Amino acid sequence: MFRTATTLAGLALVLGTAAALGHGDTAPMAVDTTGLPDLPEEMATENPWREADPEVMYKAVEIGSKGYNSNCARCHGLEAISGGLAPDLRFLEADDFGDEWFLDRVLNGYHQNGAVKMPPFGDILSQEAIWAIRTYIETRPDDQELAEKQPDIQSYHAQLSNAADDAAVAALAEALASSAAELETLSGAPKTITALDAAAFLLAQDPPQRKKALDVLTQALRN
């Protein structure tokens, strides 16, 4: 359980600081997938983390965020928000078709009129890393809707700072989870993964991870 709480805190830090990262390096970079279960040697054709247990899902998003910002953000935009240079991957359907398109581009790259528009990553990224990046992308919410949550996050932060007992903390965990559930993915994936989810999960631990949750909300307010 502590490992899960630590993972959630790490995830929130990654999500909260993504905008401060560079636009990725020009050369493809390997991704450390420590903490994710090993996948079979044969490449999956569907995202294996899409319906994973929360601990695996959050770890996949944490690793996928790092992998995306190292390899993809330079062209596809920070936090997967495209500036128009390349497709906005947040809208790639979280289904068999989207998985097939994503996997083909990642493994084989993309050429147009003889020019390399996207290098192949098949020899650089492990299967675990590929699907972690996919999970991060498909769980992104609409950035404007997330921005509109900032006043709520401020309120949750104040309430948590002043929470007098475990009952108040439990109620706040439920409120955070409900607020997070109001955000929808642009890909059609089952749920978004944001700092709201991370804080809710941390507060639902036994005992509640109040300081970690406060750190998560503080980082979210700095965006």
Image (cartoon, grey):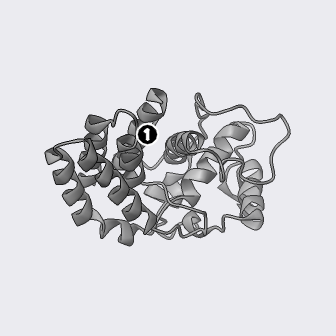
Vertical position of residue 177 compared to residue 120: above or below: below
Q: Is residue 77 left or right of residue 144?
A: right
Instruction: Kindly identify the residue that appears in the image at 59 percent across and 68 percent down.
Output: 187
Instruction: Kindly identify the residue that appears in the image at 72 percent across and 31 percent down.
Output: 38
Q: Pointer 1: what residue?
A: 8
Coordinates of residue 73 in the picture (x, y in percent): 50, 53
Please tell me which residue lies in front, 92 or 196: 196
Q: Secondary structure at mark 1?
A: helix
Coordinates of residue 145 in the picture (x, y in percent): 37, 71
Coordinates of residue 9 in the picture (x, y in percent): 38, 38
Quarter of the figure with residue 53: top right
Dot 1 amino acid type: Leu
> Label 1: how many residues lie within 10 Å, few (<14), some (14-19) or many (20+)?
many
Vertical position of residue 209 compared to residue 130: above or below: above
Coordinates of residue 211 in the picture (x, y in percent): 26, 35
Q: Is residue 21 visible?
A: no
Vertical position of residue 113 compared to residue 74: above or below: below
